[in-house]
Amino acid sequence: MQGPGGNDHRTPVRAGDRRSAQPDLPDWQKNTWYGPAPQNENPFDEPEDAPELRSSRSENVNEHLGDFWRGETSGRGYTSATQATKEKKEETKARAQKPGKRPSGRNGRKIAFRVFLTAVILISVTALALRFAVFVVRGITIDGNRTLPAEDIIRSSGINLGDNILTLDEAAVEKRISDDYRLQFRYLEKKLPNIVTIGIKEREACCWLTYCGIHYTMDKNRMVLSETEKMTQTDEQTGVTSVLPQFQQLVEVKGLRIRSGCYIGQTMILSSTRQQLLFSNLFLEMKVLSCTGDIREADLSNPDSVLLTTRDGYTVSLGDSSRIHEKLRSLLLVRQELIRMGETGGTINVANPESPLYSPPSSRNR
């Protein structure tokens, strides 16, 4: 075999030989081997000048036999595929478990999505539990009813057991309560987590009147509460005729000029605005002074000359529709003094409340 320059690299060259291809190399770097080039020899055999190495060489070196060749090398460059895969998995696991290091890439997105999904599920479960198990109406109480059953008022309110107490609309409840002509809405109280209190006021009849042969009862706002063609009843055993109980403590109103609204649940409209104002002020002040039960009759036909009749027989002249409160107070004080003095019947004039006048019955004057 010819090497570069046409020389056979297997030809021995002596140190210092001019034919050497390495004339400038030091002696220790030059090929100093003497003898013919080995032909077809085992490369693992030791040269003749080092026979002592042969005794330490394995006889099976060429056949790759023995424990040495069957074992796996520990060097990184010679690691087997199985071992490399195992080491890679262990390295990935150790990197994922390393504290303070955030996951990245697709694994990080998966973890973030799982955390988000878990949070959404927990929030949803909590909201459903609060909605259907905690903040639901378990009890409804009524404040202010006197004659009407609580069940009727609850039915009118539209609130049912099991409703969400947090979403109850007070405006809607007020409207439904007000649609019942017998009720007036006052308040709605939510006692968390599950109790509702409805404050109402029953409409109370304060007067009655006869119109077209029908007897109507009204409250102080002229709301028609009942109607009947017969206001008296006769006891079968005694034969005594008496006024129905619902009329006994009410004031009979005369002289109203009615335009419309003569139906249960409607407000009666009068033709005269002055009469409407007089009616409202008079019955409001009667309620404030708690004297509605003392008055038997009120003639409002002339707003400039209002006349009342008490149940114990006094005729009262109020004059015009001004200063109703002062005139009623003067009436109560004068009447109380007359009863103390033993006077019965007659006329009390309180048109000037500071200077009331009393006139005894005309039969006594004669």
Image: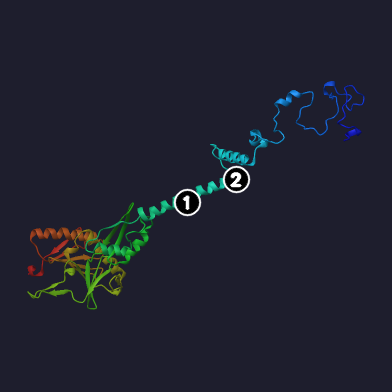
**Of callouts 2 and 1, which one flags the residue occurring earlier in the amino acid sequence?**
2
Can residue 167 be seen by looking at this rendering?
Answer: yes
Dot 2 falls on a residue whose secondary structure is helix
* Residue 135 in the image, given as x and y percentages of width and height: 36, 54
Look at the image and tell me in which quarter the C terminus lies: bottom left
Taking the spot 16% from the left edge, 58% from the top edge, the residue there is: 333
* Residue 177 in the image, given as x and y percentages of width and height: 31, 63
Taking the spot 11% from the left edge, 60% from the top edge, the residue there is: 338
The residue lying toward the viewer, choosing from 349 and 65, is: 65
Dividing the picture into quadrants, the one containing residue 147 is bottom left
The residue lying toward the viewer, choosing from 3 and 64, is: 64
Label pair 2/1, CB-CB below 8 angstroms:
no
Of circles 2 and 1, the one toward us is 2
Q: Would you say 366 lies left or right of 285 here?
A: left
Taking the spot 32% from the left edge, 66% from the top edge, the residue there is: 179
Q: Would you say 258 lies left or right of 24 here?
A: left
Is residue 52 positioned above or below 39 on the image? above
* Residue 158 in the image, given as x and y percentages of width and height: 33, 63
Taking the spot 13% from the left edge, 59% from the top edge, the residue there is: 336
Query: How many circles with numbers are drawn on the protein?
Result: 2
Q: Which residue is mark 1?
A: 120
How far is disc 2 from disc 1 in space, using C-alphas?
23 Å
Q: Which residue is mark 2?
A: 105
Q: Amino acid at mark 2?
A: Gly
Dot 1 falls on a residue whose secondary structure is helix
What sort of colour scheme is used for the picture?
Answer: rainbow
The local crowd at label 1, few if under 14, some if 14 to 19, many if 20 or more residues have their Cα within 10 Å, is few
Look at the image and tell me in which quarter the N terminus lies: top right
Can residue 301 be seen by looking at this rendering?
Answer: no
